[in-house]
Amino acid sequence: MIDHVSITAPDLALAARFYDAVMVALGVPAVGRSEDWLGYGRRADAAQPGRSYLSVLRDAAPGEAPRRHWCFKAPDRAAVDAFWRAGLAAGGADDGAPGLRPHYHPHYYAAFLRDPAGNRIEAVCHEAQA
């Protein structure tokens, strides 16, 4: 459903440290960067319309919106755990430890973090424990 998302961060060095770590944990490649931009994932095109892409742009910190967040698909529960640990180690803040959220469905396994700019991000695995 999501083609691409752009978010902002006032300090791209902090953002790069954080997003490089959590994206590696999820198996998502860093695909570019400059002094004003970071890119992760792959842009969709006619041959690969199912791809998704994240841009982190240097700009003011996002305004407070406690229910706004982005969720990344994780290939398995171990990747959700790795996402959370990597995010904490790279300057993020805990916003919900890895675990089941059965109020969504019985196998919804997710973790929530705040990036260094305050963006709320999530990683989720929808599959049953292997």
Image (cartoon, helix red, strand yellow):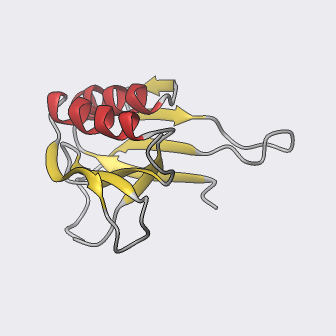
Q: Residue at x 32, y 26 (%)?
A: 21
Tally of numbered discs: 0
The x, y position of residue 126, in whole percent, is 49, 54
Q: Residue at x 34, y 53 (%)?
A: 110
- In the image, 121 versus 14, the foreground residue is 121
Q: Residue at x 16, y 28 (%)?
A: 89
In the image, farthest residue toward the front: 130
Check the image and report above or below for 19 versus 115: above
14 displayed left or right of 50: left
In the image, farthest residue toward the right: 47
The x, y position of residue 6, in whole percent, is 46, 51
The x, y position of residue 84, in whole percent, is 25, 39
The N terminus - image quarter: bottom right
2 displayed left or right of 68: right
Q: Residue at x 66, y 39 (%)?
A: 43
The x, y position of residue 129, in whole percent, is 43, 45
5 displayed left or right of 14: right
- In the image, 42 versus 74, the foreground residue is 74
